Amino acid sequence: MSYNTPNTLKYTKEHEWVSIENDIALVGITDFAQSQLGDIVFIELPEVGSDVKQGGSFGVVESIKSVSDLYSPLDGEVTEVNNQLEDEPELCNNSPYDSWIIKIKLSNSSQIDELLDSSSYENLCQ
C-alpha cells in the first residue's frame, strides 16, 4: 500500500511531518500514521508558549485502536496550536497534511538537516 508523502515536507521516524517557513515549523501526523492509528477521537495539545525538545513528547493522539505520544521534530517554542482539532480530531484522518497540530518557533535550525526526506520516510514505512 502506498501512502501520500509530499516531497515538499520533512518527516520524523516517529511519523510526524514538518513544513518549515522562515523560522516557524508546522507539525502534524503523516498519512501513514493516521492510517495505522485508525479513527482519531482525541488530540491533546500543548500550551502555547511551552518549550519543546527534539524527540520529546508534546501531546497525545488517541484513536479507537490506541493512544500514542506526539514527538517534536525540532527544538523550539510552541507559538500556536490548532484548536479546531479539539472539536474535530478526525481532520487528521481526513486530510493529514492540511491538519497541522502545532507551530514551533525554531531555536536550532540546524536540526532540520536531521529530518527525513519523503523517499527516506517512504522506505521507513515499508
Image (spheres, rainbow, N blue to C red):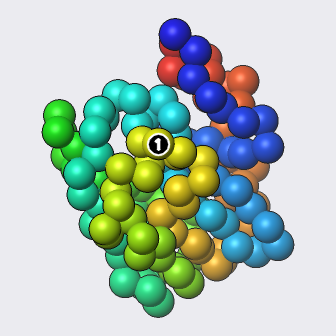
The structure residue drawn at horizontal position 57% and vertical position 23%, both measured from the top left corner, is: 3
State the image quarter where residue 117 is shown.
top right
In the displayed structure, 9 sits above or below 34; it is: below
Q: Position of residue 44 (x, y in %)?
A: 28, 66
Please tell me which residue lies in front, 43 or 23.
43
In the displayed structure, 24 sits above or below 2; it is: below
The structure residue drawn at horizontal position 42% and vertical position 71%, both measured from the top left corner, is: 84
Q: Secondary structure at mark 1?
A: helix
User: How many dots with numbers?
Assistant: 1
Q: Position of residue 31 (x, y in %)?
A: 51, 34
The structure residue drawn at horizontal position 47% and vertical position 76%, both measured from the top left corner, is: 81
The structure residue drawn at horizontal position 70% and vertical position 73%, both measured from the top left corner, is: 24
Please tell me which residue lies in front, 35 or 109.
35
Q: Position of residue 87 (x, y in %)?
A: 31, 68
State the image quarter where residue 9 is shown.
top right
- Horizontal side of 56 relative to 20 (left or right) equals left
Q: Is residue 70 visible?
A: yes
Q: Is residue 13 visible?
A: no
Amino acid residing under circle 1: Asn
Q: Residue furthest bottom?
A: 49
In the rendered image, which residue does mark 1 sit on? Answer: 94
- Horizontal side of 2 relative to 89 (left or right) equals right
In the displayed structure, 79 sits above or below 18; it is: below
Q: Position of residue 26 (x, y in %)?
A: 62, 64
State the image quarter where residue 123 is shown.
top right
Q: Residues within 10 Å of mark 1 (few under 14, many from 20)?
A: some
